[in-house]
Amino acid sequence: MTRNLSHNTTRIVAFGEIMARMAPSGMLRLRQVLPGSLDVTFAGAEANVASSLALLGCQADFVTALPEGPLTDGCLGSLRSVGVGVEHIRITDRGRFGIYFVEMGANQRPSRVSYDREYSAISQATGNDFHWDSILEGASWLHLTGITPALSRLAAETTLHAARSARERGVLVSCDVNFRSKLWRWDPARPPQQLAGDVLRELIPLVDLLMASEEDFRLVGVIPPEMAGNAAASVGLDPDRAATMARRMATAFPNLRMIATTLRENISASHNNWSAMLLDVPSDTVYRAPLQNGRYQPYEIRSIVDRVGGGDAFDAGLLYGLTHPDFTLQTSLEFATAASCLSHSVVGDCNFASREEIEDLMNGARSGRVVR
């Protein structure tokens, strides 16, 4: 059955985990500030997407399970403050509130993320804990990632349940693979890469729009043999290479309608070059962004403030474009790439860039001059 990617509604539902993000101020390291104070916000890949969409004016709802308590009260208030719908968040007596710690890198010192999220409430929730009829009523998209199924066997089953529920109701499914090597430990008999690949081969057949990197393509075994051993080639900004990978993914998973890849060149922790590729599978058309005077030219991001959440800003920007009739696939990709570029200038996981700011960057305003 052909699934129509055009919808009259713009309500987008995101399902996954949200955590307390704890970080030292600026570029300080944890050892420099503890014992002492940390900046606490709330974030998680799927919640970041919902928050960015809400800030852009979309109707975005976030679905998760959280334990009763003051952290949850603060989290719900934070989500409401940016316009995210929280009606379908389940408050439970099972599990805890997950936490992660971030140190911002600079120059040749990389950023570091440490997780404390075992036995979180969402990792112990079942698919039947959520009322999918009401959650998905009137929705155009359900957004998922490969992070939540990495938490536990039950979380993987619940994510699959959510995706099946969406497809049964005609709701499109987007998924960002987001492989996390520190997760995927819930089956000791399988190494993380194998476990992730096995679960993704169940999840991807339920997906319409896939966001994935070359590392993600490797997990499900679609890398061509002549490229499989070339680890150095995975670093860079080659949209043609990404298109080759995406076409192989589309052959392996014919349900996929679009495949997007963000392309990052890591010159240092403070200096990245950034671009993206989108394959429209039915027409076999490859789109590249950003474009300057019609030519592909990656963004040079020379003073990164916070790169955590950059991919989530891209996902939100792409979904925003796909749900607005004044956007083409090319402008949707350009909007997503510009949004994620700007997110590198914002502290925290949530992208606070406005549509006007994003479109200014799309239209060539790259200098960062003061706006008066």
Image: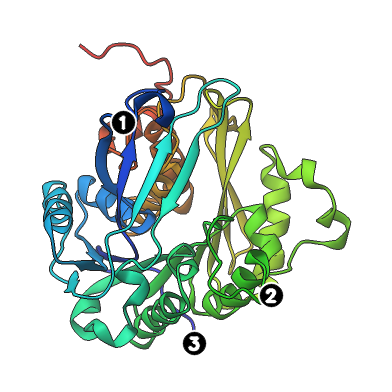
Question: Which element is circle 1 on?
Answer: loop
- Do tag 3 and tag 1 residues touch (Cβ < 8 Å)? no
Q: Which mark is residue 1?
A: 3
Residue 85 falls left or right of residue 28? left
Which circle's residue, 2 or 3, is located before the other in the chain?
Answer: 3
In this rendered view, identify the residue nearer to me: 75 or 202. 75
Q: Position of residue 256 (x, y in %)?
A: 55, 72
Q: Residue at x 42, y 44 (%)?
A: 336
In this rendered view, identify the residue nearer to me: 56 or 106. 106
Question: Which element is circle 3 on?
Answer: loop
The quadrant where residue 197 appears: bottom right
The amino acid beneath tag 3 is Met
Residue 144 falls left or right of residue 262? left
In this rendered view, identify the residue nearer to me: 51 or 43. 43
Q: Residue at x 56, y 44 (%)?
A: 276
Residue 329 falls left or right of residue 40? right
Per the image, the residue denoted by label 2 is: 252
Question: Which element is circle 2 on?
Answer: helix
Local packing at callout 2 (Cα closer than 10 Å; few below 14, some 14-19, many 20+) is some
The quadrant where residue 122 appears: bottom left
| Mark toward the viewer: 2 or 3 | 2
Mark 2 and mark 3: span between their CA atoms?
Answer: 17 Å
Local packing at callout 1 (Cα closer than 10 Å; few below 14, some 14-19, many 20+) is few
